């Protein structure tokens, strides 16, 4: 891939999965290039915002605000209940659960209600404060990095709609491996770029830096030391009125805000689940 001069705050990267510099064009959205690795097939944004610019983005109103996650909570509670039910079929025993990127703490609250001992780490300082002060959750502000938690501290780590935002998913997966106990479970939900719905709705280079298929996600987790356990399609619930804050569809949904508000007055809090096969839900295990 030809690499020219970049403005401040942007960087070129090699493939996070295999390390190759063999990118070929995949698509272009929002003025950014999304590429596919010619060696392993991983899809990612290149060039992209550097880590400092990303941190600024997630602590500003450029990204989906905390209010969006509060408004969408009736839908997210249903989605995360499905996720936790699926986890508990695989690992019925409750234990210590870490939620990476809980935002306002919807999943973490549900987990605690279901008997898990929950903790979280959240990059957005306002969201982390809301978790602590309004919900009484054990959430620290920051990112998951070496030394953040003691090794072998958790039975489950959840990355729910997080891995696509990370600047270095492989390194974070290795940290997850370190903080899990033997036979601990990693849960990942993320858009499935092998499907038409994710390609149409979830290619958002300002926020989503990586795009996984079941195959590329499996390769990445196995490279981080995990055993692949299961993967399935995961259709989430959506709250139509909360879409006024969403960054999906390039800002189209917020422009439909008046229509959504009228629908809420007439119909109440509309929550729907569409069979789009837009996301995947994967489970991996740290070996003994």
Image: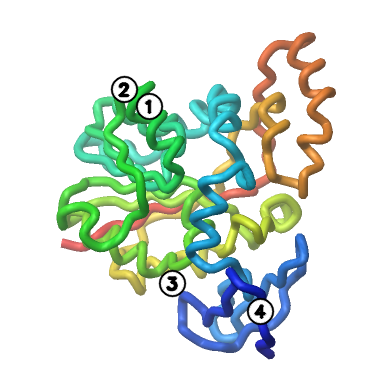
Asked if residue 68 is positioned above or below residue 26 in the image, the reply reads above
Question: Which mark identifies residue 6?
Answer: 4
Tag 4 or tag 3, which sits nearer the N-term?
4
Which residue is denoted by mark 1 in the rendering?
110
- Which mark is nearer the camera, 2 or 4? 4
- Which mark is nearer the camera, 2 or 3? 2
Which residue is denoted by mark 3 in the rendering?
219
Determine the image quadrant of residue 173: bottom left
Q: CA distance from mark 3 to mark 4?
A: 31 Å
Q: Position of residue 200 (x, y in %)?
A: 75, 54
x 74%, y 15%: residue: 264
Q: Tell me which colouring the rendered structure shows.
A: rainbow
Front-most of 3 and 192?
A: 3
Circles 2 and 3: CB atoms closer than 8 Å: no
Q: Position of residue 263 (x, y in %)?
A: 79, 17
Front-most of 152 and 101?
A: 101
Circles 2 and 1: CB atoms closer than 8 Å: yes
Label 1: state its secondary structure. Answer: helix
- Which mark is nearer the camera, 1 or 3? 1
Label 3: state its secondary structure. Answer: helix
Mark 1, Cα crowd under 10 Å, few <14 / some 14-19 / many 20+, is some
Mark 2, Cα crowd under 10 Å, few <14 / some 14-19 / many 20+, is few
């Amino acid at each position: 891939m030809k690499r020219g001069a970049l403005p401040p705050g942007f960087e070129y990267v090699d493939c996070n999965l295999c390390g190759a510099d063999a990118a070929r064009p995949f698509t272009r959205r929002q003025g950014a290039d999304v590429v596919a690795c010619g060696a392993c097939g991983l899809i990612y944004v290149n060039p992209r915002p550097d880590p400092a610019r990303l941190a600024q983005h997630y602590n500003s109103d450029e990204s989906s605000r905390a209010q969006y996650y509060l408004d969408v909570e009736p839908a997210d509670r249903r989605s995360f209940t499905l996720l936790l039910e699926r986890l508990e079929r695989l690992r019925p025993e409750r234990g210590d659960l870490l939620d990476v990127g809980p935002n306002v703490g919807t999943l973490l609250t549900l987990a605690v209600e279901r008997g898990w001992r929950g903790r979280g780490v959240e990059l957005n300082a306002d969201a982390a404060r809301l978790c602590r002060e309004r919900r009484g959750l054990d959430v620290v502000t920051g990112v998951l990095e070496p030394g953040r938690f003691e090794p072998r501290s958790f039975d489950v780590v959840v990355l729910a709609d997080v891995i696509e935002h990370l600047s270095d998913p492989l390194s974070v997966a290795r940290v997850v491996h370190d903080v899990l106990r033997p036979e601990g479970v990693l849960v990942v939900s993320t858009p499935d770029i092998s499907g038409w719905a994710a390609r149409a709705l979830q290619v958002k280079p300002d926020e989503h830096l990586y795009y996984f298929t079941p195959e590329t996600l499996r390769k990445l987790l196995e490279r981080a030391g995990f055993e692949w356990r299961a993967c399935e399609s995961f259709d989430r619930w959506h709250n139509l009125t909360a879409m006024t804050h969403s960054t999906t569809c390039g800002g189209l949904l917020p422009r439909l805000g008046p229509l959504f508000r009228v629908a809420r007055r007439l119909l109440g809090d509309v929550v729907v689940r569409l069979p789009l096969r837009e996301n995947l839900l994967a489970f991996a295990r740290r070996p003994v």
